[in-house]
Amino acid sequence: MYRYDSYDQSIVDARVEEFRDQVQRRLTGALTEDQFKPLRLMNGLYLQLHAYMLRVAIPYGTLSGKQMRKLGEIAAKYDKGYGHFTTRQNLQYNWIKLADAPDILAELATVEMHAIQTSGNCIRNISSDQYAGVSADEVADPRPWAELLRQWSSFHPEFTYLPRKFKIAVIASDDDRAAMRLHDIGLKLVSKDGVIGAEVYAGGGMGRTPMVAPLIRDFVAEEEIVSYLEACLRVYNRYGRRDNKYKARIKILVHEIGVEEYKRQVEEEFAHMRELGLNPPTEELDRIRAFFANPAYETGLSEDVDRTDPAFALWVDRQVTAHKAPGYAIVNISLKPLTGIPGDASAEQIELVASLAEQYSLDELRVTHAQNLVLPHVRKADLYAIWQKLEEAGLAEANLDLITDIIACPGLDYCALANARSIPLAQKIAQRFADAERQAELGELKLKISGCINACGHHHAGHIGILGVDRKGVENFQLLLGGSGAQDASLGQITGPGFSEDGVVDAIEKVTDIYLAERTDGERFLDTYRRIGMKPFKEAIYG
Amino acid sequence: MKILTGNDLVSGDVIWWAGDGWSRQVGDSADVGDHGDDLARTEEAALRVVGAYVIDATLTDDGIRPAHIKDRIRALGPTVRPDLNLKPNDADAGNWVI
């Protein structure tokens, strides 16, 4: 894992003291709310429906046990005993007191964490593949580049006041586990003639105008990635619209001027960047890369897993993924218990996972954009012990990528922007499809719920997506089919008129019935939808 | 009736104007008539509230009920965490917001 150097630490420490002074001035009235709001947002502090909400950055979703433990301690000490893992691999606290915010940031700084780049029109926290560094199918570990981009983008003077927020994802596998093409810029590391570089995608995103990012360059050499992104951002910063926040994202610019024209302008700017010689020193990337070198994996480990306990065997089959090192496995921890809240974890559960990471996963864990957790380096011999501890803590649900592994934004239960509640609907769907055999029969089925058009719940990218809207003060839910955030990225299509909360659960059941009736061998729900189209589903739903 | 709500500046708690100060209980709300915006400005300047705004509400047999679901959820607390809302012993409290 990356460790702060003295520059990183001093920047974060100074930021805490600056914010402490700003909070003090707000509490004494020296700053009005209008003056204070942009300052608190730059430190991840929002005013939400019930209280202040603090969003903590988890760069590319990677945490040490110590960092995770600190997140749990903060939940217990300053919040109401829990936190919420988000679709951007971050963590949110829902009940923060303004006066406590500087102390919380100071505690985070002691474990090399902060809340910078979690709000505002800047380059946001960089996201990545939760299996980075442990997946056999990657060309390189994407995290050194994600970390390099974190350092490049932090307080970048030119990109602190962009037309709108800007999200970047970095992956290095053909399997896209980070919804890369639904980001403002997506980087996919590739190998060309033995040289590492990146495919660059620009202009993707969800929200009210969803778009899948087109490829704008098929190869940028690794040493030039930062300069190329600088060119991409410069063109966006110059021409992105500032007159209308709903048209201010880069996807609108790329769409309006066209991919070819955007590419032309970026290439022109890139040529200029090359003359300036602003590529980061190779030594710096090497320094960062050294932090992500393979840990000292044990050799000669057994591949055997005792599957005598059927509940454990079921969990292994669903939650454990292949690791690149012999004798090791990747453990996916579900934060989707059938009666729980997607992405929520109690302080005790956070502490447990921190301990498991320290004891069994070489002191490392990951947060996924699907609001689950990952222990990336687990000896297969330790799987049963881990499962037992997860089971005791209510964290052993075996539903990865199944219909109950639902992504849901906080919705109207917590969010000031929401129009409808996402969480109660997720719970109703999970209970309707609770039977494990039924879930397994349906197979991979990614269901995603957003409580408003801003799409934090990624409903556009759900095989089944649900968008909550406000219809004359009453919650109403639109149903979408056919979206994907994976390597086969696509946007879901609305089925037709919306439903009540109970009505949309019934509609989903009809949709899955059609899938089961129409699928051919090996077809996922998404495959069947793509083959037979919307019509049969629509007929089943609306008659 | 018109009532005034906002968040406590220091704690962030949802609060309701009760006529002579702020309450955590929507049921204590006072009808602010046409004076809500003036009250909001005064109370914000006094650092007692942030983000204050006037909403429509009705007086029902169950007490004061904000007109919009968003404000009813603000009044109750998250419907998915009965242990954290204002009626922790009422399993059906969430239905009040619908």
Image (tube, coloured by chain):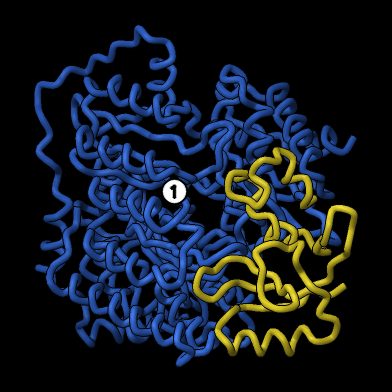
Chain colours: A blue, B yellow
Q: Is residue A491 visible?
A: no
Residue A419's place in the image compared with B95, above or below, is below
In the current view of this chain or complex, which residue is farthest to the bottom?
A30
- Residue at 73% from the left image edge and 35% from the top image edge: A508
Q: Quadrant of the C terminus of chain A?
A: top right
Query: In this view, which residue lies farthest toward the top?
Result: A308
Picture quadrant of residue B55:
bottom right
Task: Give x and y (percent) for residue A431.
Answer: 65, 29
| Near-viewer residue (A424 or A539) | A424
Q: Is residue A78 placed above or below A386 in the rendered structure?
A: below
Q: Position of residue B50 (x, y in %)?
A: 59, 78
Res. A336 in view: yes
From the viewer's perspective, tell me whether residue A246 is left or right of residue A91.
right
Q: Is residue B94 above or below residue A282?
A: above
State left or right for residue A241 relative to residue A315: right
Rendered residue at 19%/31% (across/down):
A325
Callout 1 crowding tier (Cα within 10 Å): few <14, some 14–19, many ≥20: some
- The residue under label 1 is A81
Chain ID at mark 1: A
Tell me the quarter of the picture where residue A242 sits: bottom right
The residue most toward the front is B20
In front here: A95 or A267?
A: A95
Q: Quadrant of residue B32?
A: bottom right
Q: Position of residue A77 (x, y in %)?
A: 37, 55
Where disc 1 sits, the SS reads loop
Count of marks, rendered view: 1
Q: Whole-percent x and y of residue A346? A: 43, 43
A79 with respect to A102 (left or right): right
Give me the residue at 75% from left, 77% from top.
B19
Inspect the image, locate mark 1, and give the three-letter code of the amino acid beneath it: Gly
